[in-house]
Image (tube, rainbow, N blue to C red):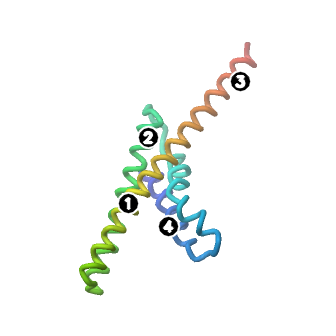
Amino acid sequence: MVKGILVGFGILILSLCSIIIPIAHFVTVPGGPFFAGFVGIGHVKESSDSYGIKGMKFGSLLGLLVLLVAGLAAAVVMLLLDPSQKITVIMWFGVIVFTLYTGSMATLGAMYSSMRADRTADSTTEETTMAEG
């Protein structure tokens, strides 16, 4: 699970770095967490959990990692720059919203990827059974 979370986090960072690319950032930044969940869950070992449980585990762990990193960054900004109370509230609100958005979209991406992988595996099994029979 750790490898998948790190892959997803790397994809998330790359999507945030693409904010400087004109026009493309309208697609890559909002879709980054979904794509991180979609690709990241593929690097997780197979488990007997349903696709919903796998997606929830993956999304919550990726959200937790984002909360730790964004919270640490916000704390460093508070210590170094000493912002006003208004800026501090806005900054922590952004951390909370970004964490929830990332976790929920990564959950949806992981669930969709798991469902698609299960459907592909089922159709391959059916084709093999028909060919043998």
How many residues crowd around disc 2 within 10 Å: few (fewer than 14), some, or many (20 or more)?
Answer: many
**Residue placed farthest to the top in the image?**
133
Q: Position of residue 79 (x, y in %)?
A: 25, 82
Given residues 19 and 61, the one toward you in this image is: 19
Q: Position of residue 71 (x, y in %)?
A: 31, 68
Instruction: State how far apart marks 2 and 3 are (Cα).
Output: 26 Å
- Tell me the element at label 2: helix
**Residue 128 sits in quarter:** top right
User: In this rendering, which labeled residue sits more in front, label 1 or label 3?
Assistant: 1
Label 4: few (<14), some (14–19) or many (≥20) C-alpha neighbours in 10 Å: some
What residue is shown with label 3?
A: 127
Q: As drawn, is 119 to the left or to the right of 49?
A: right
Q: In the visual, does 127 lie left or right of 115?
A: right
Q: Give the number of the mark in front: 3 or 4.
A: 4
Dot 1 corresponds to which residue?
99
Reading the image, the residue beneath label 2 is 54
Pointer 4 residue: 13
Q: Mark 3 is on which residue type?
A: Glu
- Helix, strand or loop at label 4? It is helix
| Among numbered discs 2 and 4, the one appearing first in the sequence | 4
Find residue 63 and report its horizontal and vertical position in percent: 38, 56
Q: Tag count in the figure?
A: 4
Q: Amino acid at mark 4?
A: Ile
Q: Is residue 117 above or below residue 84?
A: above
